[in-house]
Image (cartoon, helix red, strand yellow):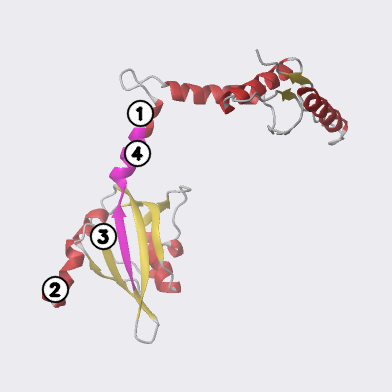
Amino acid sequence: MEHFGNLDLLSRVPYLLPVGIWIMDASGTVVYGNPAGQRIWAGTRDAGPGQYCACKGWWRSSGEPIAPEEWAAARAIRRGETSVDEEIEIECLDGSRKIILNSAMPIHDKTGAVCGAVIVNVDITARIASENRMKELVKHDGLTGAYSRRKFYDLLGQEIQPRLVGGEEFMLILPETGLGEAAALAEKLRLTISARPCGPALRLTCSFGVAQYAAGEAADAFLQQIDRAMYRAKERGRNNVVIDLAD
């Protein structure tokens, strides 16, 4: 343990770490950048808090450009904010682009004033590329490149949904209610909704599929009964109630 009291050894830790570490003073001048950080950015360049526009970056969540005052380093120096693992895309000094997790923490002097910031960058470009490849493998057949069955059902759902649903879907669970009582309630709701005015040129209608749960029946099978009845109601011109009688 005595080795860890050696200041020379401790000073080498940032040099050995696989993540980028930058230290800026209160003006935003880079006073230190470890080798990993310089590899990520393909070099180093000084930038004051008012000159962060010299660095190009985009928020991964929205694709919007990062404004000068939005950079984690600028917020740490100007407002004393701590930011952790903000996912951004950057343009490196050689023109290439990478995706990084960007963190920044303010450095305070003995009086509590912010005198600089520590910025930590983790390059996740390869990880994101691997995740994207996996998503593509899920969507496409590895041999032919054609869409997979899962992607087919996704596309089919997108095409069918606007044509068959035409609005929102809700489900009513009616414990201790017979099939006839449930159908009567659905009809009452249908009439009430269709009679309610929604504007001078609008008419709201509902289709109901009614089914009765059988003891021991699988939940998926029961839901298929309800869906089958509801789609029959829509096929009959909508705005009606259809009872699904189990085989």
Structural crowding at the residue carrying mark 1, measured as other residues with C-alpha within 10 Å and reported as few (<14), some (14–19) or many (≥20): some
The CA span between labels 2 and 1 is 49 Å
Q: Which of marks 4 and 2 is in front?
A: 2
Amino acid type assigned to the residue bearing label 1 in the image: Leu
Amino acid type assigned to the residue bearing label 3 in the image: Gly
Give the residue at mark 4.
131
Image spot of residue 93 (x, y percent): 27, 54
Quarter of the view holding residue 15? bottom left
Structural crowding at the residue carrying mark 4, measured as other residues with C-alpha within 10 Å and reported as few (<14), some (14–19) or many (≥20): few
N-term-proximal mark, 3 vs 2: 2
Q: Nearer the viewer, mark 3 or mark 2?
A: 2
Q: What stretch is highlighted in magenta?
A: 117-134
Image spot of residue 54 (x, y percent): 36, 60
Give the residue at mark 3.
20
Give the residue at mark 1.
137
Q: Which residue is drawn at 12% across and 76% down?
A: 2
Give the SS element for disc 3.
strand
Q: Tags 3 and 2 in contact by the CB under 8 Å rule?
A: no
The reply to whether residue 55 is visible in this rendering is no
State the quadrant of the C terminus: top right
